[in-house]
Image (tube, rainbow, N blue to C red):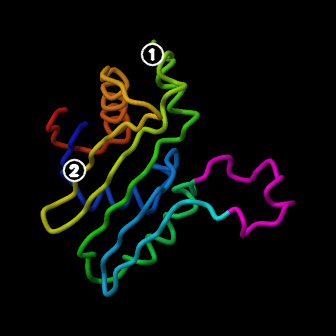
Amino acid sequence: MLALQIKDIKSFMSKLLNTDTFDSFLLQEAHIQTFNTFVIDGHLNRGFYSREELEDPDFPPYDLSSWETMRGICFQLIKGKKVPLLLKLTLVYDPHEAVNLLEKAGAAEFTSALKSFVLTIKYDQKGLLLTTGTSFNTFFMDRTPDLIWDEALRQFLLQKEIDFDDYGN
């Protein structure tokens, strides 16, 4: 697990909510506290869709909504003159990309057991903190996938010019 303190909150929030920077993620859950508390469960309700929609090749292949489709909704809930009391997002890295990441790092043996690479974004009065996590379908003592995910996220943030303090893992 990795903890990263974001240095420029305004810039980060702009990239998160107004650009495609984090569109390679899916939304698992969002907690937003402004004048009310809003909780969004990112799991798709497949019963809402028609058979034709579900069979459409462009229909999302995962059980979670993409961040791309949800970021506008989250932005609408927090925009205004006041900052939110709390914004906590639990994002999941695109599963296909997660498998590619493990394979490229020479850790393909973990791909079948990997459930998800998780990124938690928490903004409150203390600042903005990112934490990583790895979820498996079974228990592992080996931390190799965690270390691969942690390093990949560091590199992602550097590539996107997001400045952070690293508290390690």
Label 2 sits on residue: 6
Image spot of residue 20 (x, y percent): 50, 52
- The reply to whether the C-beta atoms of the residues labelled 1 and 2 are less than 8 Å apart is no
How many callouts does the rendering have? 2
**In the rendered image, which quarter contains the N terminus?**
top left
Image spot of residue 37 (x, y percent): 34, 80
- In the drawing, what numbered circle is on residue 134? none
Mark 2 or mark 1, which is nearer the start of the sequence? 2
Image spot of residue 69 (x, y percent): 58, 61
Amino acid carrying label 2: it is Ile
Crowding at dot 1, Cα within 10 Å, few <14 / some 14-19 / many 20+, comes out as some
Amino acid carrying label 1: it is Ala
Reply above or below: 118 against 19: above
Task: Tell me: 14 left or right of 58.
Answer: left
Label 1 sits on residue: 107
Task: Tell me: 127 left or right of 152.
Answer: left
The residue lying toward the viewer, choosing from 43 and 60, is 43
Reply above or below: 79 against 101: below
Image spot of residue 94 (x, y percent): 53, 41
Residue 52 falls inside the magenta stretch: yes
Task: Name the residue at 50% across, 32% down.
Answer: 98
* Secondary structure beneath label 1: loop
Question: For the magenta stretch, what is the residue range?
Answer: 46-63
